[in-house]
Image (cartoon, coloured by chain):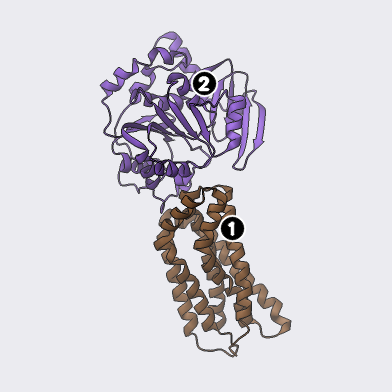
Chain colours: A brown, B purple
Amino acid sequence: MYSIVLYLVAGWSGFFVMGVELLGGRLLAPYFGSSIYVWGALITIFMLALSIGYLAGGRLSIHSPSLKRLGIILILAALTVSPMLLFGTGMLDSVSTAIEDPRFGSLIGSAVLFFIPTTISGMVSPYAIRLLVDDRATSGRNAGHLFFVSTFGSAAGTILTSFYLVLWLEVNQILITMIVISLALGLVACLIPKNRRDE
Amino acid sequence: MNAPRLMRFLLLALVAGMPFGLQAQELIHSEKSLYRQVLVYEDGETRCMCFTVRCSKGRQTCLYVKNPDQLALGYSELMLSSLYLEPKPKSILIVGLGGGVLPRTLSQLVPDAKIDVVEIDPAVTRVAEKYFLFKQSPNLKVSEVDGRVFVKRAGREKKTYDIIMLDAFDHEYIPEHLLTQEFLEEVKPLMHPGSVLAANTFSGSGLYDYESVTYQKVFGEFYNLKTANRVILARIGGLPTLAQITENTSLFESALAKYRMTADDVIPLFNKRVDWDPKARVLTDQYSPANLLNSR
């Protein structure tokens, strides 16, 4: 049960990040268009945020790592996405008024909306690896499994969002659904009894 | 239909219907831009701008090499018939340049009008100038910016236009943020009572119902001109009657002869019939899967 939840958290987090990224393109388009500049800015911010998240997640895993804390990371990532629902359009409106260049406008807009939740999401993978690894001999295999699950989740989040979800639901409905799933899964992770791996 | 008209009609039908691959079609120019590949093909009689190899997904613009004023694609006539609703425009906004046939023709028909064109892709503007006789002038300026961004800015500057033409879609890809209720609601303040909107859209795809209800939601009743394309003509302050429109056609009949356009081709297409599902979902910034719907 413990490792199932752990992998679920990692896979879902991958899904969540790519879902938010694609919907981010939708949110930016009315203000900056949907050109390669805008996608470039968006992807830059996501990659930068993830890279910093990896550092932070690795650092955080040193002191008393637990599945509960991993659940809290997932919950925080979801909660920091929610301001987008309320203030996203107003914020992008002011940024696009202040910065006319579509490149830097969309870069700043993406940074304000997505940097924090994506950084927090980036913490999930290294933290989860710490919880999985028992010894040096199996560490590579554990990391491989985890990367597989989380990147597979990203692929699923990308195709489902862009091919199907946008056809069925509104952008905010998709975001709310994903936030609710993150909160639920994070809560489950918090409630799973301690494992021998929790030291 | 008299004999020369019939001939012309058949010729047009032939050109429009002929798969270009069968003709001796020669690629005369190709350039990559930030957005796409811009290709120019010529087959002796016509020269076309396309965004896909051998124009497999439709043509952006065509002209007859020996008679470049003649309108080669049927939808141009439908778009230009917005002049019948507003015969004396002083300002015109065109979103989407293509080969520049619409602004080029309009700047000849109404030379005093100020024409703003929005074209996101500088390569398209370059190719239009080099191969399609398009020229900028003090009264005809192209802005290289996203259509939606231009409209937002124009709104902040409280600009208005007598005619607004939306022509930014191709068969291959629709910029989805230019086909939502919010976009049209940003276009509307750029219009004043009497301003006319002409939108070149799709007639036969899964998008038709969605698009129709979206335009209707923002602009109310509109004239729906359908051929292979569908052009929506809306007006702020209510549509003129068909009698008024027909009366206005006389103002242009002699001027339009040069372009081989006549009101007799267009007037029968004017109708307001709701031939779409009125319960279809309105496209919004929150819900705009235009490309997924268009491929259905």
Q: Determine if marks 2 and 1 fall on one subunit.
A: no
The image position of residue B173, as x and y in percent, is: 52, 42
The image position of residue A3, as x and y in percent, is: 57, 81
Residue B294 shows up from this direction? no
* Residue position for label 1: A43
The image position of residue B294, as x and y in percent, is: 46, 43
Crowd class of label 1 (few under 14; some 14 to 19; many from 20; radius 10 Å): some
How far apart are the alpha carbons under marks 2 and 1? 46 Å
Count of numbered labels shown in the rendering: 2
Q: Quadrant of the C terminus of chain A?
A: bottom right
Numbered mark located on residue B14 in the image: 2
Could you say which is closer to the camera, residue B48 or residue B150? B150
Numbered mark located on residue B115 in the image: none
**Horizontal arrangement in the rendering, residue B283 relative to residue A33 (left or right):** left
The image position of residue B92, as x and y in percent, is: 42, 30
Residue B269 against residue B285 in the figure, above or below: above
The answer to which quarter of the image holds residue B58 is top right
Give the amino acid type for the residue marked by disc 1 in the picture. Ile
- Helix, strand or loop at disc 1? helix
